[in-house]
Image: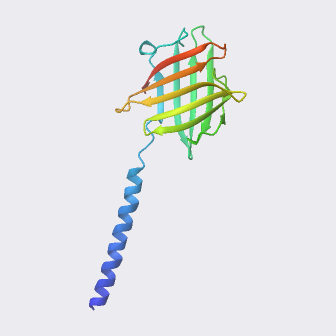
């Protein structure tokens, strides 16, 4: 009789350990804080060269193990831009579709839980590097862009986005 009790106890203990490990792994995988819709706050941002866009909205969503980024903007002259890409955070070039001002591919890497680095290229040549940092409260994101734009001008933009 004692043997049966010990075996039952061992099974229960193993099951409890397994449930605890599985629950721990689920809770350890916090959602990516960049996921969602972000709108640029032009008044809090700086653009060199200007002028800034009238509005920019960027949507981040998970598609399997990759992140899809869709950007829509209205430029100072009223023209619109729409471009998107779907990449993993693996540093490999992915195509950009639409009319991105920084090129035809992007490679993304995660620096830490709140920071993503994107390297944009046009015809294989680096045009811009963007570093996106999410504030600890998750409500704002600062995107620093350095490089050159489609007109060949040096760019140093710091765009502040607010989560919608």
Measured along the vertical axis of the image, is residue 44 above or below residue 106? above
Q: Is residue 67 left or right of residue 121?
A: left
Q: Is residue 55 left or right of residue 92?
A: left
31 left or right, relative to 89: left
The quadrant of the image that shows the N terminus is bottom left
**Position in image of residue 20 (x %, y %):** 35, 62
Decide which of 3, 49 is in the foreground and name it.
49
Which quarter of the image is occupied by the C terminus? top left
Residue 89: quadrant of the picture = top right
Percent position of residue 64, x then y: 57, 47
Q: Please report the residue visible at 44 percent of the width from the left and 17 percent of the height from the top.
A: 41
* Residue drawn at x 63%, y 20% as measured from the top left: 101
Residue lying farthest left? 2
- The answer to which image quadrant residue 128 occupies is top right
> Which residue is most to the right?
123
Percent x, y of residue 54: 52, 12
Determine the residue positioned at 36% across, 73% down. 14
């Amino acid at each position: 009789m004692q043997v049966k009790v010990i075996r039952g106890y061992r099974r229960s203990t193993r099951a409890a350990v397994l449930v605890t490990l599985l629950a721990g792994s689920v809770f350890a995988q916090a959602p990516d804080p960049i996921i969602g819709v972000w709108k640029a706050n032009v008044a809090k941002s700086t653009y060199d060269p200007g002028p800034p866009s009238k509005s920019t909205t960027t949507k981040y969503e998970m598609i399997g193990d990759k992140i899809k980024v869709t950007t829509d903007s209205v430029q100072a002259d009223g023209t619109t831009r729409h471009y998107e890409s779907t990449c993993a955070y693996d540093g490999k070039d992915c195509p950009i579709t639409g009319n991105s001002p920084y090129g035809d591919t992007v490679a993304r890497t995660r620096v830490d839980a709140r920071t993503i680095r994107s390297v944009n290229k046009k015809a294989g040549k680096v045009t811009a590097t963007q570093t996106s940092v999410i504030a600890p409260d998750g409500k704002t994101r600062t995107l620093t862009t350095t490089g050159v734009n489609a007109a060949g001008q040096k760019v140093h933009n710091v765009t502040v986005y607010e989560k919608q």
